[in-house]
Image (cartoon, rainbow, N blue to C red):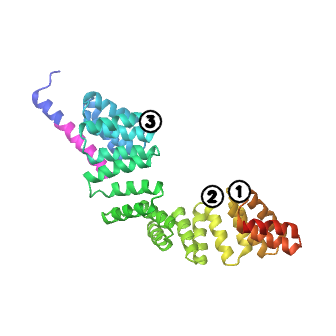
């Protein structure tokens, strides 16, 4: 059957409406419905390159990375210069860990638009995912030069500074991201970690509290508990570690932190229990053995304390605190030879 010109115009308008509906679903975050809309459209017109990109974005957000890459490839066969297809295929390859393919697409994007902030940031993300923090910082810095008002660029660079141990620079970038309006649990938790690493425990406590006001996160409770330990607030630290472990019972550092807090509160039986739990994961950490040994000493169990101190020193022979405590046990036993050996080690 021949189609009249008016019929062809009507079909074209209908496809455009369908495409706009798909885009609206993407904007609203309804990725399943967007996927359906773009798929129906492509059944009617398999040469609609932008519809393939729209469906790819839906797949990407639904974590269907291989399908997203495939749709971007279909779009690029129809239009090899379609930047949005290159960009989303690079993101898909990045999520799939196919870094060479992602790099090729990212480089192609810079050929199309060398000064585009999103494309520079993509280069930074590629380097970051491969553990090249210094290179990532250079790309983020170049992107910031193009888009100084982009909060997520500062946040991305901050994470790379933190990976390099440059906590002062990381904190400055997190602060800038916050001033630019990026107020998320991810940012505040990351900045809390940086504050803690710098010894700014009040700042770490404040940022972790902001996170916990939004949502209960075991990592945030653990971090705030650790900060409170350093702020000489073991009682509230215990409560935070309790909450962390209630949400995730397999957090060895939360057990360790709670063991320290119990020891500070002279609750030595609880400290022994938590240190023992921590040792299920951290049996190669000298300080865990030391904490349990000190609590055993407070409970009068010299044999258990001596065994733990000896294990601590096996792992770290130069641990002076462990030597000092073991010397005290040897003195109580009258083992002067062993005492002299440990005291000599303490003084060297």
Instruction: Please give left or right for residue 106 compared with residue 162 in the image.
Output: left
Q: CA distance from mark 3 to mark 1?
A: 36 Å
Residue 125: where, in percent of width, then height?
A: 39, 46
**Image side of residue 329 versus residue 139, left or right:** right
**Magenta residues (range):** 13-30
Q: Say few, some or many: other residues with alpha carbon within 10 Å of mark 1 (under 14 / 14 to 19 / 20 or more).
A: some
- Circles 3 and 1, Cβ within 8 Å, touching? The answer is no
The part of the image, by quadrant, that contains residue 298 is bottom right
Sort mark 3 into few (<14), some (14-19) or many (20+) by Cα contacts within 10 Å: few
- Image quadrant where residue 339 sits: bottom right
Q: Specify the principal SS of the magenta part.
A: helix
Provide the residue designation for mark 2: 250
Which residue lies at the image location 55% right of the left edge and 74% below the top edge?
228
Q: Please report the residue visible at 28 percent of the width from the left and 43 percent of the height from the top.
A: 22
Residue of label 1? 283
Query: Looking at the image, is 137 positioned above or below residue 230?
Result: above
Does 26 lie within the magenta span? yes
Q: Which mark is residue 98?
A: 3
Please state which of the two labelled residues, at mark 3 or mark 2, is closer to the viewer: 3
* Quadrant placement of the C terminus: bottom right
Marks 2 and 1, the one that precedes in the sequence: 2
Q: Nearer the viewer, residue 268 or 127?
A: 127
Helix, strand or loop under label 2 = loop
The residue closer to the viewer here, 189 or 58, is 189
């Amino acid at each position: 059957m021949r189609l009249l010109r008016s019929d062809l115009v009507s079909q074209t308008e209908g496809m455009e409406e369908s495409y706009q509906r798909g885009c609206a679903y993407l904007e609203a975050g309804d990725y399943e419905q967007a996927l359906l809309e773009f798929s129906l459209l492509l059944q009617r017109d398999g040469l609609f390159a932008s519809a393939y990109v729209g469906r790819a974005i839906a797949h990407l957000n639904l974590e269907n990375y291989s399908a997203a890459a495939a749709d971007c490839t279909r779009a690029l066969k129809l239009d090899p210069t379609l930047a949005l297809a290159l960009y989303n295929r690079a993101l898909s390859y990045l999520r799939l860990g196919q870094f060479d393919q992602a790099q090729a697409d990212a480089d192609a994007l810079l050929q199309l638009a060398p000064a585009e902030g999103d494309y520079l940031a993509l280069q930074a993300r590629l380097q970051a995912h491969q553990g090249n923090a210094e290179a990532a910082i250079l790309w983020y810095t170049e992107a910031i030069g193009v888009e100084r008002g982009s909060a997520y660029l500062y946040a991305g660079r901050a994470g790379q500074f933190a990976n390099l141990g440059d906590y002062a620079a990381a904190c400055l970038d997190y602060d800038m991201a916050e001033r630019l309006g990026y107020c998320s649990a991810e940012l505040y938790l990351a900045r809390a970690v940086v504050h803690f690493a710098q010894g700014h425990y009040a700042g770490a406590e404040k940022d972790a509290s902001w996170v916990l006001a939004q949502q209960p996160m075991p990592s945030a409770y653990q971090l705030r508990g650790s900060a409170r330990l350093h702020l000489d607030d073991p009682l509230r630290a215990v409560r935070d570690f309790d909450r962390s472990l209630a949400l995730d019972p397999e957090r060895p550092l939360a057990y360790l932190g709670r063991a320290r807090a119990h020891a500070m509160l002279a609750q030595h039986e609880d400290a022994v229990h938590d240190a023992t739990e921590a040792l299920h994961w951290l049996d190669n950490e000298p300080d865990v053995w030391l904490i349990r040994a000190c609590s055993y000493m407070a409970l009068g169990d010299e044999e258990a304390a001596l065994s733990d101190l000896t294990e601590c020193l096996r792992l770290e022979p130069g641990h002076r605190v462990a030597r000092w405590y073991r010397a005290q046990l040897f003195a109580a036993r009258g083992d002067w030879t062993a005492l002299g050996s440990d005291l000599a080690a303490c003084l060297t």
